[in-house]
Image (tube, grey):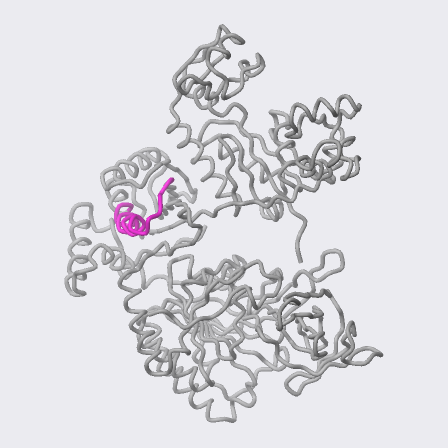
Amino acid sequence: MRHPPRIACLYIPHFVAEVELRQSVPNDRPLLITDGPRVLGGCERAAEMGVTPGDLLRQALARCPQARVIQGDRAHYQRVWQQIVETLGMHSPVIEEGPWGLAYLEAHGMGALYGSEADWCRAIRKEILRETSLSARLGVAGSKFASMIAAQTSPPDPGRRIIVEEDHAFLAPLPTNWLPLSVETRRRLRLLGLHTIGQFAKLPANTVAEQFGPVNLEFHRWARGKDERPLRGRKCEVLEAHAEFEVAEAREGALLEALLAMGHSALQELQQGGLAIRRLELEARLVEGETLQRSAWIGATPGDETLRLIFRNLLHTLQGESAGVVALGIKFVGLEPPSGKQLSLFAQAEDRTRLEEALRRLARKHSAECVAQPCELRPEAPLVAERYALQAYRL
Amino acid sequence: MTYSLLTIEQMFYIMSLREDAMSTKSRKQLLEYTISAIQKRWGHQAIHTAVEEAPLVLSTGFPALDRALGTGGLPRGRLSELIGCGTAGQGTLAIQAIAQAQRVGQQVAYVDVEHTIDLDALARAGVRLETLVVLRPLSLSHALEMTGDLVAAGAVGTIILDHLHDLALLTQSEAAQGLDRALREWTPQLGRSLCTMIILTETASPGLYPSGLALPYFASVRLECERQNWLRHRGRITGFIARVRVLKNKLGPSGQEVLLKIRIGG
Amino acid sequence: MSPFWPHGAPIEIQAEDREVNAPQAEPRSFLWEGRLHRIQELSAHWRIHTYWWTEVEIWRDYWKVVTDTGLLCVLYQDLTQGHWYLERIYQ
């Protein structure tokens, strides 16, 4: 049985400018970021003056002559955005990335997991702020469109808006500007005295098709709270390793060697598996009973020396916190490859060979049909029997 | 947060990954040298073998049950039995054990005695089907033989044997002797390879487990599942509460009971 | 595990006041592997009709039921022939 959808939208307004402002000296002037002749992003003040990303720089400067203009660093913005997406992946099973500053998350069941949807949103915002110093807004509703509007209309504090009523009831009083209608369609709606989404939603579908063209039927459904676009997300793979010390260890050298021993070979296997490692998390349980967590954004799979440096830097942040560590845990956060198929995080070469030899012996001794493996047919098929099947194990 | 111990065996495994071409003997020597070098440089406390102090476990996927078992999960290298009658939760426990085993990088083999494996339920629970091995024996004695071959090979981390039923008939048949012999052979082999074996048994009614079977003796952990209430949403059944009783636990406390919420999908 | 029969395990059904093999007959009890299972609750009912354009038309009435023997299971009636099957038992 299908559950009613719950989707959250994460929105960071003026993402590029916010990233730049976090790392620059405060300045009174509005900020524009360029990418060649065009505007890549602008701060809130620039947006209020009518500057939008994609504008030609000279047009933007005409609207906002006092602006400070800096050259953008796309690679850096992408890294920060990926860091945010990874963080979201720790709080939801499905993440759909939009353009920088916009993402959708599966929200079903998250309220129960975290206590409430508000608690869930709070946890996500807190972690993004900690990781990137960026303030995010979240909207939760029954569809992508409504959740996006909820996020964009949420107040900066608490930075979330959770829609509990039906989406169409929430959307009804909002102006039609929120819908991605063409300029001409908006003009015609104004001429007809239709200013709100609710008024547009009340029109019969055939009237919408006749008056505004069939292309607007989908937006008409959105207005009625019937945005049925599914989340198209990817899942995050995580690899963990742990170690315990019989006697609490405070020496950085010993802790470093233990971390390297745990992480080094696993990292090699991950590299061979073609997975990208974006983030490394360290968890240390102290002899006092407290557990400390630290993380480092890597951005790319590190080499040996980089890994040593990362671990050393993470351990430095623990100095002075405790009389010793009794347990260490590391977590590598990786992404699925673009094909969407999950690969085994642990390509256990030797174990795999041993297994295949054992299965070969079984197939020879008993019969090839007795050793099988599942395969995916049509996971969304209405008939359960058509979703997956067993086939003879490929040896 | 649960922690697993880094034993010599696991260190050996981690070090061995780097040296695929090396022989077993030279990998062992490399491991011993490495441990000795670390201890020489940073003292004996830098690295420990702690395997004798606490058992290796496989999380059940239900934190309350892991806590009730006292050790954090089902013991690796040993046999566990999940008992239930009808819709009781034992199947869900087994599915979660598979998912947990795969999460920690183990290879899992599923012995489908009755040819009733529910691949859809496994997929919905997050089991990675493409790495699951499924054995389809022709009879119970065939199942015991195939399982024995797999255990002897020491090539998988977790084996699920699904399931034994008609236990009263089983005690009176030759298959009981076969099971007895098989369990006797498997027990030391499981210990050597640290393979977790989980056997599902179906009773005719709750609490009715016939005497005369060797399985209760050889199992280190025995969990009995019984459905309590249905969970409903708008009148429709969406799951149930299962009471899981720890009937036997060689490595921790027994007699504990936990209530688990089991959701039904599809 | 949750037993699943991809091709259905044949059962004998007793329906309510109607000819057993007629469409939309609500099951009241069924006989499976020599044991009678009385249905205490009909939790859900749905129909699948597909492949009608081929020779292997699938036209089935599905029932999710609770039995007095402690099963939550899915039965279906093949409406092209009237026979009943057990598809899965939730565990």
Report whether A314 appears left or right of A119: left
Q: Main secondary structure of the magenta part?
A: helix
Decide whether residue A180 is among the magenta residues: no
Task: Relative to C50, say whether A293 is above or below.
Answer: above
Q: Residue furthest right?
A: C17
Tell me which residue sits at (53%, 36%) in the image: A103
What residue do we see at 35% from left, 73% from top? B190
Quarter of the view holding residue A228 = top right
| Whole-percent x, y for residue B85 in the image | 61, 76
| Residue A370 spot, x, y in % from top left | 41, 78
Tell me which corner region of the image, top left, top right, bottom left or bottom right, holds residue A10: top right
Q: Is residue A265 magenta?
A: yes
**Residue C47 x %, y %:** 71, 65
Residue B235 coordinates in the image, percent (x, y): 76, 59
Residue B72 in view, yes or no: no
Out of B137 and C8, give the one closest to the viewer.
C8
What stretch of residues is rendered in magenta?
A259-279
